[in-house]
Image: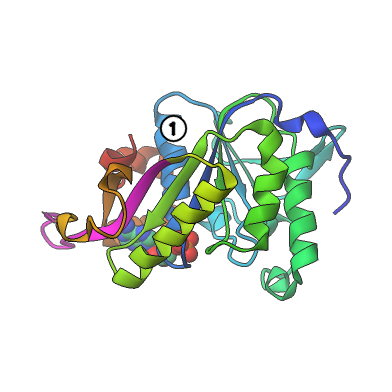
Amino acid sequence: MEAAAEPGNLAGVRHIILVLSGKGGVGKSTISTELALALRHQGKKVGILDVDLCGPSIPRMLGSQGKAVHQCDQGWVPVFVDQEQSISLMSVGFLLENPDEAVVWKGPKKNALIKQFVSDVAWGQLDFLVVDTPPGTSDEHMATMEALRPYRPLGALVITTPQAVSVGDVRRELTFCRKTGLQVIGVVENMSGFVCPHCARLNSSSRLGRKHLYPLSHLTSSVPLDPELTRSLEEGRDFMQEFPKSSAFPALT
Ligand code: ADP
């Protein structure tokens, strides 16, 4: 895992967005992936940095599992997930022989890898870098923020679900953002309502009952639970073609 340190590797990145969630399983990696596809759909060049070290699921979602990361003089070359090379991806999933390996790492080792990810990946010119963070607000988040601070991240997208416990967690994320000076650019309520697998009709749920839980001004969008979306991500299908039909499309574009 040795790569040449190159502090200027993020110099060509225009905007950095961190994706946060209070706990796992709320769809943070899904929304990170769909956000990257949405930005790409708008003609942007996008990188995804997957620092969710214990659950690196983005390579699978983008059909890039098992691809190799190469080295160049500037460090690691991220994996291009599409032919046009408009989405590049770096994930610990590309570096491990056994995907369960990172789960047993201690904090300092994780933090060192996060710092290395920030300094040693040769992104080139990007409009956006989407950073998929681990769930919660741990040392790994502090390490990520410390490493990214010199590059002035644009802000954070906080992912939650309608369940009260998750909504409670989102408030901790908002506090983390406030304390670290990270602007909240939006809250996405994922799996809010559902798309009927038979008739594809959207059954939405109202957010108004939860407005006391987090400021409604932050609640920019909601994405329904859609079995088609699960399937498409599980199978890593032709995501470029399918994205405009994704139920996350209206919320993220
Ligand atoms: P996290 O990154 O928060 O742990 P994931 O993005 O890995 O969560 O999502 C957990 C599971 O839920 C995955 O199987 C994913 O496909 C599924 N999922 C996430 N969001 C949706 C959605 N809106 N509709 C259907 N399935 C979803």
123 and 18: which is toward the camera: 18
Q: Which residues are magenta?
A: 185-203
**How far from the left and from the top, in percent, is residue 15?**
56, 29
243 vs 5, nearest the viewer = 5
Image vertical order of residue 59 relative to residue 197, above or below: above
Identify residue type, mark 1: Leu
Circle 1 Cα neighbour tier, 10 Å, few/some/many (<14 / 14–19 / ≥20):
some
Main secondary structure found in the magenta portion:
strand
199 falls in the magenta region: yes
| Mark 1 residue's CB less than 8 Å from ligand 1 | no
Residue 66 visible in the snapshot: no
> Considering only vertical position in the picture, is 10 above or below 157?
above
Q: Residue at 75%, 34% (x, y): give it.
A: 122
In what quadrant does ligand 1 lie? bottom left
- Residue at 59% x, 47% y is 180
Vertical side of 114 occupied by 168: above or below: below
